[in-house]
Image (cartoon, rainbow, N blue to C red):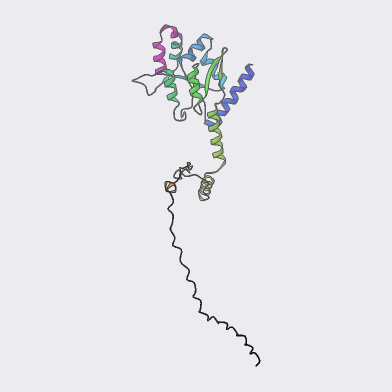
Amino acid sequence: MKIKRQKHAKKNMGFYKHNFGFREPFQVLLDGTFCQAALRNKIQIREQLPGYLAGATQLCTTRCVLKELESLGKELYGAKLIAQRFQARSCLHFKDPVSGSACLLSMVEGGNPHHYFIATQDQELATKVKKRAGVPLLFIIQNTMVLDKPSGKSVAAAQAMQTQQLIPEHQQLSIAQLKEEHSLVKTSEAKKRKRKKPSGPNPLSCLKKKKKTQETPQLSTPKKKGTRKRKKRKLEAPTLQSAP
């Protein structure tokens, strides 16, 4: 089981080293919940973590985390003593301290430029960390420290960076120009086509049609030429004269 866990850790560390430039010494930000879990499970963080990550580590916390542990009282006194052994990194909340989870999230903003690991048992904080690319997450399960597998955000960011490295910059520019020439890229100024809504009847078409009184032009009939009617003369039958 220990060998299998070491293989998973080595694989995950190789992912962050190759894609996000993590180098030794690895900087690990711890909160109060992780220190409390380590105390309960009798885990020596300073001695065991470098062997698990296969490299030198720098364990650190923030002032907001220490202030939060102080405010929680005796219940987390042992966790406060453990956290005080680590280096306190300066944060932006010197005058107005915030919760430990909010402070750790602010330390990895802007793409985690300082390559911090986050070590926590807070499930809400862990969910928010997974939504940020390039932030490794550590937690404790069954008396052992575990490096979580890369989140979906980290995998997607790594794939995007690999595709950019495969294609040279001048080729990327030429491809973009060709797309613009052939109008394959949708510009922001392009207006979206509006779907025509079914419109009502044209009000002009509802008007009653006026009857057009067309004057039928009288066709001029050609005058017939007067033809003389010949009267038929009746031939008078000759009267027979009686003999004397």
Return the x and y of residue 161 as percentages of the image width and height: 54, 36
Return the x and y of residue 16 as percentages of the image width and height: 54, 28
Quick check: 31 above or below 187? above
Name the quarter where the N terminus is drawn: top right
Residue at 54%, 36% (x, y): give it.
160
Per the picture, the main secondary structure of the magenta-coloured stretch is: helix
* Residue 25 visible in the snapshot: no
Residue at 43%, 11% (x, y): give it.
80
Quarter where residue 101 is shown: top left
Of 168 and 207, the residue lying toward us:
207
Name the quarter where the C terminus is drawn: bottom right
Check the image and name the residue furthest to the right.
243
Of 117 and 187, the residue lying toward us:
187
Check the image and name the residue furthest to the top.
74
Residue at 53%, 29% (x, y): give it.
154
Quick check: 226 above or below 152? below
Quick check: 238 above or below 8? below
Residue 65 in magenta? yes
Residue 41 in magenta? no
Give the number of callouts. 0
Quarter where residue 60 is shown: top left
Q: Magenta residues, as a range?
A: 62-78
Of 188 and 163, the residue lying toward us:
188
Check the image and name the residue furthest to the bottom.
244
Check the image and name the residue furthest to the left.
95
